[in-house]
Image (cartoon, rainbow, N blue to C red):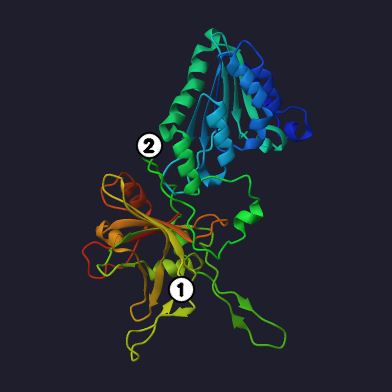
Amino acid sequence: MAHISFLKPTDQPTGTSRLMRIIADCLSQDAYESLRMIVAFAKLGPLVRLKKAFQDWRRKGKTIEAIIGIDAKGTSEQALRFALENFDTCRIAGSESRMNITFHPKVYLFDGANDFNAFIGSNNLTIGGLETNFETFTQLKGSVPENERLVADIRAIWDDAQRCSFYLNAETLLELSEKGRLADETKNRQGETANHGKTRTAEWQPLGKFPHIKLIPPSPIPKEESAKKATPKAAAKKGKRKTTKAAESTLSYSRTLVIQVFPHHNGEILLSKIAVNQNPQFFGYPFKGRTKPKFDKNTPYFQRTPDPVVNISVYDSAGNVCAGHGAFGLNTVYYSLKHEIRITVPQDVIRNAPNYSILVMRQPDSTASYDYDIDVFAPGSQEYDEYLAVCNQTLPSGGKAQPRKFGWL
């Protein structure tokens, strides 16, 4: 029977027990022949500290393999370069989806013909994860023959993680860096974010290398919560009249709109003023700018200024990316006569998005230097039905036989 033990949250920061020391000790033992690591993030710090132990291990003919996630730029270019030079194999894990799904497992498996030692918990391959953070893991240790089923289950974690990963080489490392998918440990955090909100750069670019896996979006925000009207805030100052500030949305925590669309040949896509009323902050509404009419007699409309910066990807019925644009300025206008919110997209987006395609408009995290990720799924694609199930509100039909639907995540 396997021996089971646990790392308690305060063990690492107080120095009582640290996974770094445990890994170094395991690397010195003859009982194990391979080390497999599955982590969400990796940085250079723990790797250089373990470098000599890694080298001694491999000189004995033993192997080191890793599967490392690159979501949220939690992994650095320097760490992956180290893995290329010092591990037998390294795979990169994640997906092309931008639905805020993160590759997040942390598993360290020392394996031998007769003995195994596994650590499954919250510890990333970083200094914080292995030494200083409040972390926890479950240690499973014992004889392989006596725990054949348990060892097979742990090994199956590795096999499954390969489904959403691909092999790293020098060429893909360069591509990951050029497409902004990795952290650079030569730059401090302040330097990386110093231009936030000022530069038109899009941080996410598709790689086209991850195996395609059908991913299921989270459950939608309930219709009754979405349909609640925002309540204006009243602000009063002594001796002055009360003034009404912009309404605070009950959906201000929602960062993703899912909506069926009818792309127009002129490049415009109609969103929904109903959705804007439910969550004005999401759209940056009310708009402050004005359009410039072609003719002086025409009335200008309110538009968002500056144009929000977006990444756009269109997926065909087979689930393949058939159009894409990074750092695109999304012209966004409120047509008051018809109470419509319209965005203008490139023509190849229009050509590849049939009527009733689903547009997923997602705000990235607060550190990003752009405003939205937009994915458009054509009917028939694997993700289409899953996103359609999220659309729990129905829009006015506008004379069409089938009304559009939308929802919030």
Left or right: residue 147 versus residue 23 is left
Task: Tell me where residue 253 appears, x and y as whole percent.
Answer: 54, 58
Q: Looking at the rendering, which quadrant does residue 45 occupy?
A: top right
Q: Is residue 131 above or below residue 261?
A: above
Which SS class for mark 1?
loop
Label 2 amino acid? Pro
* Marks 2 and 1, the one that precedes in the sequence: 2
Number of dots carrying numbers: 2
Q: Residue visible at 44% across and 47% down?
A: 218
Placement of the N terminus among the 4 image quadrants: top right
Q: Is residue 20 above or below residue 343?
A: above
Task: Tell me where residue 26 appears, x and y as whole percent.
Answer: 65, 18
Q: Residue visible at 62% across and 21% down?
A: 55
Q: Residue visible at 31% across and 44% down?
A: 382
Mark 1 = which residue?
Answer: 304
Left or right: residue 403 versus residue 214 is left
